[in-house]
Amino acid sequence: MSYKVTLIPGDGIGPEVIDATVKCLEALGVDIEWERVAAGECALESHGKLLPDATLETIRRNKIALKGPITTPVGKGFRSVNVAMRQIFELYVCMRPVKSFGLPTAFHQDVDIIIMRENTEDLYAGVEFSENAAETNKLIEDINAISKEKIREKSALSIKPISRFASERITRFAFEYAVKNNRKKVSCVHKANIMKYTDGLFLDTFYSVAKKYQGRIEVSDVIVDNLAMQLTKRPEFFDVLVLPNLYGDIISDLGAGLIGGLGLAAGANIGDTMAIFEPTHGSAPKYAGKNKVNPIATILSASLMLRHLGESEKAKILEQAIEDVIKDNSSVTYDLKPTRDDPTAVGTKEAALAIIERIKELQK
Ligand code: NAD
């Protein structure tokens, strides 16, 4: 089977980790025709736009993309190219697996959690009002006229919209994923004790959807601060987590920390018809071009892409090769060593090469 996939190397360390990933997929023997396009700071230089129309067009056409991280230029154009792409294509699920890969120095060895973060609303919706603007002061006045609780004068405001529609589709996706992937439990993460209307709606919707899966999937809910504590103590207690946007963002990084850091944290942004696969980490500009950072988060994101394409057997080989290289620990980047200045750490290219060698051995 042959596939056409949009490839967005991105900024900073993006081109290096994407290059390493493409080489691993070549070694696996997956037949992919890449359509390489620009987005981010590099596109601003070449196309005068952070998110060129041609880039959007290829994603729309191919319906699938592999993307490196993109720098968010402070104070220019989009709030974030990444957030914009998720909104334009209605990629309403941000799926982030948090799985132990046998890293000797990781805090936990038996983590296997899937984070399903709602990707389109909540405090990420971008509905914000700046301090002292006339419309902000007017809004504060209007709210104070109808609300029992008052907002302090001259505050800045960020609106947190949560809808039944968006809460329902992310929850349904999480349950369907659990059923298809033999998962046992789905937990809703919230702060409905304080945000009774927004998080309350998210939680209420979760339990309405959950009814359909009664007897097949165990169901629970957990308050987000309690979850943060529980994850550090006994992450094996959790399976699939469904969260509103902001909690999902924060818990994803906590999850990455549990298994060994951002260098291992893969991600996928999924909608009804399209998907963009990308690591959780950013463009780490200080390491750009230094052959220093870990390519595994991007390689694992490509593995999620293979599963999405129905290439599960290839994905299994890729993940096994990664696990073997991590466990062996001799050909890994600095972030997977016991100390950050460990002289035995290898570079991005060498780490990818070790994975490629292992892929070849596994395929013999
Ligand atoms: P970052 O994730 O780029 O880097 C933070 C630190 O994490 C780095 O300094 C490095 O120590 C470590 N790190 C990150 N990736 C690593 C890897 N692959 N291997 C080893 N160590 C790694 O976060 P930041 O510095 O806050 O953000 C830099 C830029 O990236 C910003 O412009 C931000 O907006 C953007 N960003 C983009 C995305 C995305 O494209 N999806 C996500 C997050 C941040």
Image: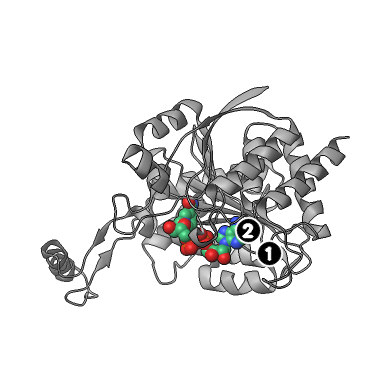
Query: Could you say which quadrant of the image residue 196 lies in?
Result: bottom left
Residue type at mark 2? Lys
Name the outermost residue toward the bottom. Answer: 152
Q: Residue at x 42, y 42 (%)?
A: 39
Residue 245 got which mark? none
* Residue under numbered circle 1: 334
| Residue 158 appears left or right of 358 | left
Disc 2 residue lies near ligand 1 with CB under 8 A? yes
How far apart in space, not on screen, are marks 2 and 1 (Cα)?
8 Å
- Residue 113 place in picture, x, y as percent: 66, 57
Quadrant location of the N terminus? Answer: top right
Residue type at mark 1? Tyr
Tell whether label 1 touches label 2 (CB within 8 Å). Answer: yes
* Residue under numbered circle 2: 292
Q: Residue at x 78, y 40 (%)?
A: 317
- Residue 347 place in picture, x, y as percent: 68, 56
* Above or below, comparing residue 189 to residue 118 in the picture: below
Disc 1 residue lies near ligand 1 with CB under 8 A? yes
- For disc 1, the neighbor class at 10 Å (few under 14, some 14 to 19, many from 20) is many
Which mark sits nearer the N-terminus, 2 or 1? 2
